[in-house]
Image (cartoon, rainbow, N blue to C red):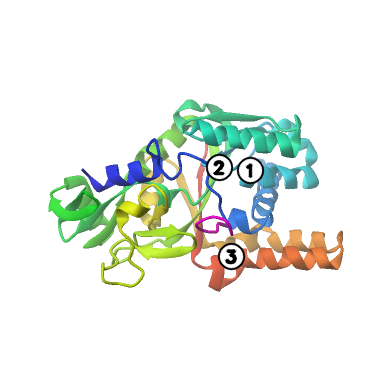
Amino acid sequence: MKFSEYMTEWLYGKDGYYATYKNIGKEGDFYTAVSTSKFFGGTIAKHIISLVDEGFLESNATICEIGAHHGYFLADVCEFLYTLRPELLRSFNFVIIERFDDLQRQQREYFEESFGDTVSITHYKSLSELKCKNAFFIANEIFDAFPCELYYKGKTATISTHEVNFDVENEWVTERAKRYYKDRGEIAIGYEEFAQEMADSCEKFEFMSFDYGEMSARPDFSLRIYTKHKVIPFFLPKEHEDYLPRETLFAKSDITYDVTFAHVKDAYEEVGVAFIELKAQMVGLIDMGILDLLEMLKDNVEEKIYKQELEKAKMLILPDFLGERFKMIRFRKEQ
């Protein structure tokens, strides 16, 4: 089968890794910015308020998270909206795009526990179901979870019994590899369709996403597996001490790769959505006001609580943790 089909089954099949709820953070296979600090969502809430103040977002806009997992991220956004501009919590429409019924149920339960009937969430299984006039879309670590094809010197991979062979010609993959100056590596599948669905779903919107990668493509394979906070390169030699058979990891661990943001940018620009910026997460969060939020916290809580939250927030912006490796990419569609 194609490698993209194999990866889709690994992550999104009936028994795939993301088909049911998985712990993220200390008890899971990896950390995310969301699992690190509530001030990640808080900073996005502050940015959303700035979009209202500048007139880009209406007070009845749709706030939509794509791939919300447990729902912590959007819930953190709501919590800070309640603190900073509570009337928006009542006037915004909150939406989650989530394909899996089990995760939708987890998200509804978490919002009910957190907000009672104060915040109402609408679920859609895909962006193609959503139609709105004005929106802010947010996603965290979504583009690295798109299936990909593997490419090596003109050949595209197939996979059989978990073994990879570079043995077929694929014109589309080869064209993308040439466009991004790759002679080997991952070529993401689905960015173009995703961008088109978003462009068709809303008349005017801003989209912000955070992921690891660079604007230019890596010159090598970055495909890797995360299991219990251990990183296993997909092509790790069998004789290596950390090697684990792929069949034992299949659908039980996360599989991911570095994002080529030039590919994301091209996908959106091709459907008429303007690229605004790509920044290190550290720079993006500071520009959007995370330090201002921490100052507000300092003025309103005990020093012990402030120091605890400060240490968590540092993980979002320190260069040697999430601050530099993760990037923020932002797009806008005007009416």
| Nearer-the-camera pick, 331 or 192 | 192
Quadrant in the rendering for residue 52: top right
Residue type at mark 1: give it: Leu
Element class at badge 3: helix
Is tag 1's residue or tag 2's residue first in the polypeptide sequence?
2
User: Mark 1 sits on what residue?
Assistant: 74
User: Can residue 335 be seen in the rendering of this structure?
Assistant: no
In the rendered structure, the answer to whether residue 249 lies left or right of residue 173 reads: right
Residue at the (64%, 39%) spot, across then down: 57
C-alpha gap between disc 1 and disc 3: 21 Å
* Prevailing SS of the magenta stretch: loop
Magenta residues (range): 26-32
C-alpha gap between disc 1 and disc 2: 7 Å
Is tag 1's residue or tag 3's residue first in the polypeptide sequence?
1
Residue 68 image label: 2
C-alpha gap between disc 2 and disc 3: 23 Å
Residue type at mark 2: give it: Ala
Residue 199, given in percent of the width and then of the height, sits at 45, 35
User: Mark 3 sits on what residue?
Assistant: 283
Residue 29 in the magenta stretch? The answer is yes
